[in-house]
């Protein structure tokens, strides 16, 4: 044990199992006080699960948690908070219709005699927190009036208000400007001096290297490296994140690529806080080509696909399909031109859960089944049944609600719905997210089959194995820009380095 940074909380042999997957496997983790303990790993590596266990949001299926040398079980988040654990979640957990002050103190209000809320004391404390965070935000402002970066600051203030001994920060800078990031780092240094143990999760490796005192690397739920940051260099991080050797993934379907079918030029999407979420991106896809777009969280990949699908009116740039300029400014117009998107969140953006499988499959192509002013249910059902067979969707009846299907089969319904629009280019955002290994393999086989039939596919992923396995060509994004292009069979380390361009020649001494 380091006397300067004693272990405040530890996990031994920790395991966490969800249906169909084991998120944590025999994890041993030490959280040191008065230090920044950084966590590194690809999406799905288990970082957020580990932090949710520490914060009481999830419970281990096996193993023990020790706090100050004594075994402890956190029944829920409030129980963990009573033991001094605070967390700033990656997804904001705030109420837009409440004020800044009310959001900061919700659930632990300051009161008179535990009966009446002391509003003036809360407002004064909120104002002090805003000053500490160097923000000119009126505590009485409704949260919904703030931009997203300011809301992130309020989320951090909410954690600071609980005077946590252990503070977990999960992607805290994802929505912050560069100036706000500097403020946060100054607050972290102050908390370290007070003896607070900080866990810091981020895909921005340059941040971790800058502020980290200890590093833990997770891969597929297993800790593959844990040590002091002293002497850590980029090859060590990459090796522990992805494994030492690059992998060769043979294609199961071989075919010739055709002419260019899709091209975008100078796509830009400005951020409300300044700068660009998508920064002058140009790329192309050929008929029959699978182009993988790899990058870490916040790189701008999903935003690029949304711009292509006309979901951001303030975006700019040029779009061509088959060499012809696309001038339609609506989602429906771009679907008619041959674009189709498989969204990242299939439940929210891809399906209507209360509708039947048949209705979901045909939702984007109802015009094909309309006779004058009437919908031909027979023609619709026949086409839906054909899609079910083509996509190998496991169903009992087309008339069952789509919510009755497994995650993998729901994803097949989303793909089937997109294919019914007869697209020339298929955009896929994290197509294998949240599905089991068997369903993932089926989705991959479907993608290869579609490409072999001549369809151009541009797919986004933060899974390195996926982009290496599927892509005929790999593009890499970071900070809103394209930072690398690689052929099939590229070296994994080169791809990861392109996704973290600020670190290519950096090492910790």
Image: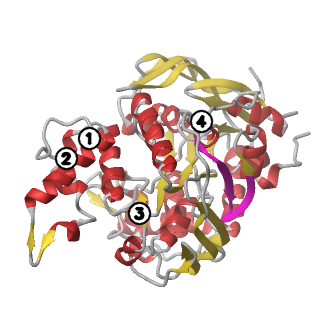
Give the CA separation, mark 2 to mark 1.
6 Å
Earlier in the chain: of badge 2 and badge 3, it is 2
Query: Which residue in the structure is indicated by mark 1?
Result: 389
Range of residues picked out in magenta? 470-485
Query: Which residue in the structure is indicated by mark 2?
Result: 385
Label 1: few (<14), some (14–19) or many (≥20) C-alpha neighbours in 10 Å: few
Residue displayed at 67% across by 55% down: 475
Note whether 170 is above or below 437 in the view shown: below
**Where residue 423 is drawn, which disc sits there?**
3
Note whether 156 is above or below 26 in the view shown: below
**The N terminus appears in which quarter of the rendering?**
top right
Q: Main secondary structure of the magenta part?
A: strand
**Do the residues bearing badges 4 and 1 touch, measured as CB atoms within 8 Å?**
no
Residue displayed at 44% across by 57% down: 92
The location of residue 153, given as percent across then percent down, is: 55, 63
Residue displayed at 51% across by 24% down: 24
Closest to the observer: 449 or 244?
449
Task: Say which quarter of the image contains residue 285.
Answer: bottom right
Earlier in the chain: of badge 3 and badge 1, it is 1
**Do the residues bearing badges 4 and 3 touch, measured as CB atoms within 8 Å?**
no
**The C terminus appears in which quarter of the rendering?**
top right
Give the CA separation, mark 3 to mark 1.
19 Å
Asked whether residue 379 is in view, the answer is yes
**Do the residues bearing badges 2 and 1 touch, measured as CB atoms within 8 Å?**
yes
Note whether 412 is above or below 147 in the view shown: above
Helix, strand, or loop for circle 1?
helix
Query: Which residue in the structure is indicated by mark 4?
Result: 251
Colouring style? secondary structure
Helix, strand, or loop for circle 3?
loop
Give the CA separation, mark 4 to mark 2.
29 Å
The location of residue 434, given as percent across then percent down, is: 41, 39
**Do the residues bearing badges 3 and 1 touch, measured as CB atoms within 8 Å?**
no
């Amino acid at each position: 044990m380091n006397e300067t940074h004693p272990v405040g909380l530890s996990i031994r042999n920790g395991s966490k199992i969800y249906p169909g997957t084991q998120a944590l496997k025999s994890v041993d983790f030490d959280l040191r006080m008065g230090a920044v303990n950084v966590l590194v790993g690809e999406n799905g590596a288990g970082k957020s699960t580990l932090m949710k266990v520490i914060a009481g949001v999830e419970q281990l299926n096996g193993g023990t948690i020790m706090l100050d040398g004594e075994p402890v079980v956190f029944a829920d988040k409030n129980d963990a908070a009573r033991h001094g654990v605070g967390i700033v979640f990656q997804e904001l957990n705030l109420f837009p219709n409440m004020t800044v002050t009310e959001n900061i103190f919700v659930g632990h209000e300051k009161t008179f005699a535990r009966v009446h809320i002391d509003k003036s004391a809360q407002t004064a404390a909120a104002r002090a927190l805003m000053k500490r965070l160097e923000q000119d935000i009126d505590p009485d402002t409704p949260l919904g009036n703030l931009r997203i970066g300011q809301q992130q600051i309020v989320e951090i203030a909410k954690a600071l208000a609980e005077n946590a001994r252990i503070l977990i920060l999960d992607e805290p800078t994802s929505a912050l400007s560069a100036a706000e990031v500097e403020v946060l780092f100054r607050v972290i240094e102050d908390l370290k001096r007070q003896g607070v143990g900080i866990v810091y999760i981020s895909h921005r490796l340059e941040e971790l290297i800058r502020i980290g005192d200890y590093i833990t690397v997770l891969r597929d739920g297993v800790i593959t490296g844990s040590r002091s940051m002293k002497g850590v260099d980029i090859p060590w991080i990459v090796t522990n994140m992805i494994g030492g050797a690059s992998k060769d993934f043979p294609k199961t379907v071989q075919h010739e690529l055709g002419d260019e079918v899709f091209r975008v030029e100078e796509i830009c999407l400005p951020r409300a806080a300044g700068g660009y979420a998508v920064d002058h991106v140009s790329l192309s896809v050929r008929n029959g080509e699978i182009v993988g777009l790899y990058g870490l969280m916040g790189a701008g990949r999903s935003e690029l696909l949304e711009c292509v699908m006309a979901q951001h009116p303030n975006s700019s740039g040029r779009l061509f399909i088959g060499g012809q300029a696309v001038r339609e400014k609506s989602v429906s117009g771009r679907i008619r031109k041959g674009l189709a998107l498989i969204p990242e969140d299939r439940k929210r953006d891809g399906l209507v859960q209360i509708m039947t499988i048949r209705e979901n499959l045909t939702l984007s192509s109802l015009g094909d089944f309309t006779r004058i002013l009437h919908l031909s249910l027979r023609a619709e059902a026949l086409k839906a049944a054909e899609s079910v067979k083509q996509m190998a969707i496991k169903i009992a009846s087309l008339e069952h609600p789509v919510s009755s299907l497994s995650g993998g089969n729901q994803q097949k319904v989303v793909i089937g719905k997109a294919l019914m629009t007869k697209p020339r280019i298929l955009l896929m955002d994290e197509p294998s997210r949240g599905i089991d290994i068997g369903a993932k393999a089926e989705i991959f086989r479907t993608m290869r089959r579609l490409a072999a039939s001549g369809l151009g596919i541009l797919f986004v992923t933060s899974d390195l194995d996926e982009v290496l396995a599927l892509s005929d060509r790999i593009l890499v994004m970071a900070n809103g820009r394209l930072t690398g292009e690689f052929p099939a069979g590229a070296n994994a380390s080169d791809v990861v380095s392109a996704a973290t361009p600020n670190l290519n020649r950096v090492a910790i001494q």
